[in-house]
Amino acid sequence: MTREALVAGLAVSAFEIDKGFAEFIRGAYGHLPGFELYEGDFMKTWRTALATSGVPALAFGNLPYNAAGAIIATLIEGGVRPARMVFTVQKEAAQRMCSVPSTKNYSAFSVLCQSTYLVKSVFDLSPGSFWPQPRVSSAVVTMEARATAIPFSGEKAFTGFTRACFSSRRKTLRNNLKAAGFTEAALMEACTTAGISPDARAETLSPERFSSLYLAIKRPGFEWPADILQAIESDDELDPSDQGEA
């Protein structure tokens, strides 16, 4: 993919954590104009790349399965939102990214991705498509920027709020948000304003409905509960791919 992009005349900022592969890539493409290699963990190098190369127009790659959710969340929450992104991820991650409300794979990660992008799983890849072969199936996912992003999309506070709503899938919004530190009075007022039942489950709400509820509860002078505030203020990037209890 790197070679084809360079042949097409694109400027490429590549990331590679494996020293052996990084050495190979640098030897193969390091002399070409428009090529930058950032060696190391993407989560530790993306800010340097952003400062050096700016926001990319496109993003693509085979993402490491154990970090795909965190990488995608980092791009969206970090304001790095290319018009189009294409990633190979574990099939289960692709299902979470594309799932619609009231399905078992719909999660806070689904809300994060779909609040900013139109997400589509275009085809699956068997383990035999790779060497060495992984033990899981993969999928290629396209992410096309929405013409109008949902309000608050990509804000860490909004992500923290949706994660709190999904913290236990068997429980209602009322119970999950009370467990996160919201008061009964604040919940009832916000749900009434947004036209959402406090006894609904998070998995039934579309990203637009989450945005409406978030707006209703984020009133002037509102103070976030301590555990959500800690997540918002943390220097660690959020990985909202967890879904709570099955």
Image (tube, rainbow, N blue to C red):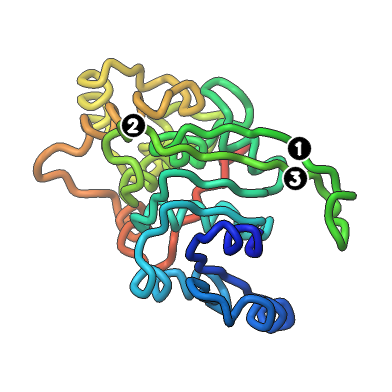
Q: Is residue 209 left or right of residue 171?
A: left
x 10%, y 41%: residue: 220
Quarter of the image for residue 50 reads bottom left
How would you rate the neighbour count of disc 3 (Cα within 10 Å): few for under 14, some for 14-19, many for 20 or more?
many
Q: Is residue 221 left or right of residue 152?
A: left
Q: What residue is shown with label 3?
A: 138
Which numbered disc flags the more N-terminal residue, 3 or 1?
1
Q: What residue is shown with label 2?
A: 147
- Regarding residue 70, the answer to whether it shows in the image is yes
In the rendered image, residue 218, in percent from the top left (x then y), is placed at 20, 38
Q: Amino acid at mark 1?
A: Asp
**122, 167: nearer the viewer:** 122
Q: What residue is shown with label 1?
A: 124
Q: Amino acid at mark 2?
A: Ala
**188, 157: nearer the viewer:** 157
Dot 2 lies on which element?
loop
- In this rendering, is residue 28 above or below 58? below
Residue extending furthest left?
220
Q: CA distance from mark 2 to mark 1?
A: 27 Å
How would you rate the neighbour count of disc 1 (Cα within 10 Å): few for under 14, some for 14-19, many for 20 or more?
some
All told, the count of numbered labels is 3
Quarter of the image with the C terminus in it: top right
Quarter of the image with the N terminus in it: bottom right
- Regarding residue 167, the answer to whether it shows in the image is no
In the rendered image, residue 236, in percent from the top left (x then y), is placed at 43, 66
Contact (Cβ within 8 Å) of mark 3 with mark 1: yes
Q: CA distance from mark 3 to mark 1?
A: 6 Å
Which numbered disc flags the more N-terminal residue, 2 or 3?
3
In the rendered image, residue 204, in percent from the top left (x then y), is placed at 48, 21
